[in-house]
Image: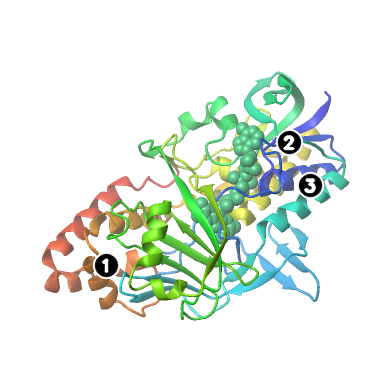
């Protein structure tokens, strides 16, 4: 074999896989469809979450990697620690603490998803990815940009990966492959792994976001927040939220909206226009949020098929987060090394994968579908204002606070109560059973 491992995808997961495998002495090639590998064109708020998020309904929810991690901040560098897999990574880019996740109604009534404690750090993902790439190259990994992984096929003694680059199509061969090509992975599809997943919502076109970087934003909100809002008057069919806005590691803010039109309407909305009085847009891009070519699928329960191991978002329903992508890549390489050495590594990887991510638990889906319920239940801004006014300043996940206090809404707005109640009942029917 020319290679021990072919890695498909050069996001955080793929680069971590290539770096780890090359540092351990394996012959690695990484293929990435982008020309500039370190350019991030997938939506990401660039938060490194350090609080262990509870997987209980009463607790605080997260959708990604639930094992504890920590960040050690020194004078000129940071060190990201992943104690369960057992590795650390240096990062020399900027960081900024992240304290609050505030969900505001159209008139500005807040519910705090997270408050006052340091929940994580905003960091510069392009800098982080560039450092991983440099380490992978230093360790000897071969990098093939502008090359698309089309399909993988297991053979009796390895794997063939069909790729398409500038020079046309070719087939690469290796003992093992790691699929790290993100959501809607070609490699996962070619191996038939999507057929083993439960489809929870039908396929839908679109799935992109407009990402806008701003300087001089003045929200007047408590420091370093991540803000979300659902505003029916400017976004009549919100999938979940109308805007997502985070601070960036420097002095900038990042704002995600479903379309340019919604972004413009948000900036002109009477409640939010004052935030933009002195703001300047420094960068605007269209970004992939995830797409939904296949609809919303449950996670791949067993992300190994023959000689191919799947890591990061390629095996997740929505996202593993960057930290989950690098953790799974590290674990996958260690599993592959055991297999190459004649031991069994895959069962351990599968077992770890099923425990390390919240999306294997039904409560994760209650959270996701609860968000859909709310977005679909609002018919006008007054609906959202009425409910957020009732629960303003509470700390918790809005859809859970609202569900647990539906009777309060019944008195003042019986018709809205009925819509919400029906929505929650529908959402519960969509929640997959544990283990599916
Ligand atoms: C709105 C939003 C906000 C988010 N905020 C955060 C956050 O604050 N913190 C956080 O940790 N995570 C966040 N995430 C999630 C995070 O972006 C992902 O979980 C993470 O990037 C997953 O890494 P990955 O390497 O598995 O996949 P990706 O980052 O998607 O990387 C996949 C790579 O594979 C390449 N590729 C795709 N197909 C092919 C192919 N066929 N051949 C070759 N190359 C291919 C892509 O170009 C890409 O470089 C957010 C996601 C969204 C949608």
Measure how far apart labels 2 and 1 are at the Cα level.
Answer: 46 Å
Decide which of 214, 422 is in the foreground and name it.
214
Question: Sequence-wise, which precedes: disc 1 or disc 3?
Answer: 3
Mark 2 and mark 1 in contact? Answer it, CB < 8 Å: no
Residue drawn at point x = 48 percent, y = 58 percent: 256
**Tag 3's secondary structure?**
helix
Q: Which residue is mark 1?
A: 384
Question: Sequence-wise, which precedes: disc 2 or disc 1?
Answer: 2
Residue 167 visible, this orientation: yes
Disc 2 CB within 8 Å of nearest ligand 1 atom? no
Decide which of 362, 21 is in the foreground and name it.
21
Q: Which residue is mark 3?
A: 20
Q: Which residue is mark 2?
A: 145
Horizontal and vertical percent position of residue 415: 12, 62
Measure how far apart labels 1 and 3 are at the Cα level.
Answer: 48 Å
Query: Quick check: 28 left or right of 282?
Result: right
Crowding around mark 3 (Cα neighbors within 10 Å: few <14, some 14 to 19, many 20+) is: many
Residue drawn at point x = 60 percent, y = 30 percent: 187
């Amino acid at each position: 074999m020319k290679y021990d491992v072919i890695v498909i995808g050069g996001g955080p997961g793929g680069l971590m896989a290539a770096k780890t495998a090359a540092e351990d002495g394996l012959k690695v090639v990484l293929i990435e469809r982008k020309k500039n590998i370190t350019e991030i064109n997938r939506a990401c708020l660039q938060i490194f979450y350090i609080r262990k998020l509870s997987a209980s309904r009463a607790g605080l929810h997260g959708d990604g990697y639930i094992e504890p991690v920590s960040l050690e901040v020194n004078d000129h560098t940071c060190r990201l620690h992943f104690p369960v897999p057992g590795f650390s990574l240096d990062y020399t880019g900027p960081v900024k603490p992240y304290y609050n996740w505030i969900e505001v109604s159209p008139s500005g009534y807040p519910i705090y998803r997270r408050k006052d404690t340091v929940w994580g750090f905003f960091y510069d993902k392009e800098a982080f990815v560039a450092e991983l790439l440099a380490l992978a190259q230093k360790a000897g990994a071969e990098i093939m940009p502008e090359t698309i992984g089309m399909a993988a096929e297991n053979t009796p003694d390895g794997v063939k990966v069909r790729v398409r680059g500038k020079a046309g199509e070719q087939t690469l061969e290796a003992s093992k492959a790691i699929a790290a090509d993100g959501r809607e992975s070609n490699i996962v599809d070619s191996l038939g792994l999507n057929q083993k997943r439960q489809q929870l919502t039908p396929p839908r076109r679109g799935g992109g976001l407009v990402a806008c970087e701003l300087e001089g934003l003045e929200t007047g909100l408590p420091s370093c927040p991540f803000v979300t809002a659902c505003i029916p008057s400017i976004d009549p069919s919100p999938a979940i939220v109308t805007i997502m806005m985070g601070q960036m590691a420097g002095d900038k803010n990042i704002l995600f909206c479903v379309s340019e039109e919604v972004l413009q309407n948000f900036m002109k909305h009477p409640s939010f226009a004052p935030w933009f009085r002195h703001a300047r847009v420094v960068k605007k891009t269209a970004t992939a949020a995830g797409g939904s070519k296949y609809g919303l699928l449950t996670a791949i329960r067993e992300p190994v098929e023959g000689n191919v191991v799947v890591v990061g978002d390629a095996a997740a329903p929505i996202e593993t987060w960057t930290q989950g992508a690098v953790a799974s890549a590290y674990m996958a390489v260690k599993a592959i090394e055991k297999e190459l050495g004649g031991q069994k590594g895959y069962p351990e990887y599968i077992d770890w994968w099923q425990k390390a991510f919240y999306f294997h638990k039904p409560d994760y889906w209650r959270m996701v579908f609860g968000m859909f319920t709310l977005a679909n239940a609002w018919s006008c801004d007054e609906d959202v204002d009425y409910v957020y006014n009732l629960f303003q300043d509470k700390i918790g996940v809005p859809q859970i606070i609202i569900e647990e206090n539906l009777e309060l809404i019944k008195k003042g707005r019986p018709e809205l109560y009925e819509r919400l109640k029906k929505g929650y009942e529908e959402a519960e029917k969509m929640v997959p059973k544990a283990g599916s």
